[in-house]
Amino acid sequence: MQDKIIVKQIKCYTQIGVADNERAIGQNLLIDISAYLDLSKAGLVDELESTISYVEISKAVQITCKKRAFKILENLACNICQDILGQFSVIQALEVEVHKPHIPNPQFIGQASVFVFRSRNSE
């Protein structure tokens, strides 16, 4: 399946980090979502009901980020996949990239991100 909806740079504030003080402060993350689904009907009928709202995808990401504290980006990315695939049955596969632009460690220069791909066939 090649059709997909892409929502980029969803800004989320969450408690994330390995160190207790890092989780206590919390951080802003940027999250990119690519949802694979059949968009042929939406392309013909021009109705939101035949696709998925970008707003709903963004809301689902926000809810996952706020539901608990996370230690590592990998766990957050997998939780986002699980929650979105659970909420939107029409999505056949999902790519999630979580960007952590600010690492509060003076020994690290740059930013980190994690990319995960999940599909209903591999669940």
Image (tube, helix red, strand yellow):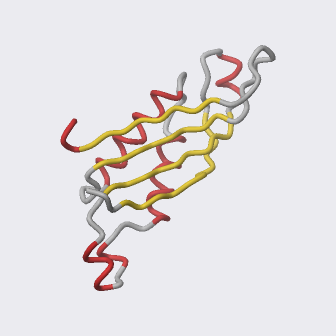
Q: Position of residue 70 (x, y in %)?
A: 53, 27
Tell which residue pokes out farthest to the right in this image. Answer: 106
The quarter of the picture where residue 88 lies is bottom left
Which residue lies at the image location 31% right of the left edge and 53% below the top edge?
87
Q: Is residue 115 above or below residue 19?
A: below
Q: Residue furthest bottom?
A: 45
Find residue 80 and report its horizontal and vertical position in percent: 42, 41
Frontmost residue, 82 versus 39: 39
Q: Which quarter shows the N terminus? A: bottom left
Q: Is residue 116 left or right of residue 15?
A: left
Rendered position, 70 above or below 13: above
Q: Image check: 40 left or right of 105?
A: left
Q: How many marks?
A: 0
Between residues 62 and 45, which one lies in front from this camera angle?
Answer: 45
Residue drawn 52% across and 48% down? 32
> Relative to residue 68, is residue 15 drawn left or right?
right
Give above or below for 118 relative to 37. Answer: above
Q: Residue at x 37, y 77 (%)?
A: 48
Residue farthest toward the front in the current orientation of the protein: 2
Question: Residue 97's x, y, as percent?
Answer: 50, 41
Q: Quadrant of the C terminus?
A: top left
Q: Report the residue at 26% width, 73% height from top.
A: 40
Along the line of sight, the residue nearer the viewer: 17 or 99: 99
How far across and how far down the image is residue 25, in percent? 72, 29
Dividing the picture into quadrants, the one containing residue 106 is: top right
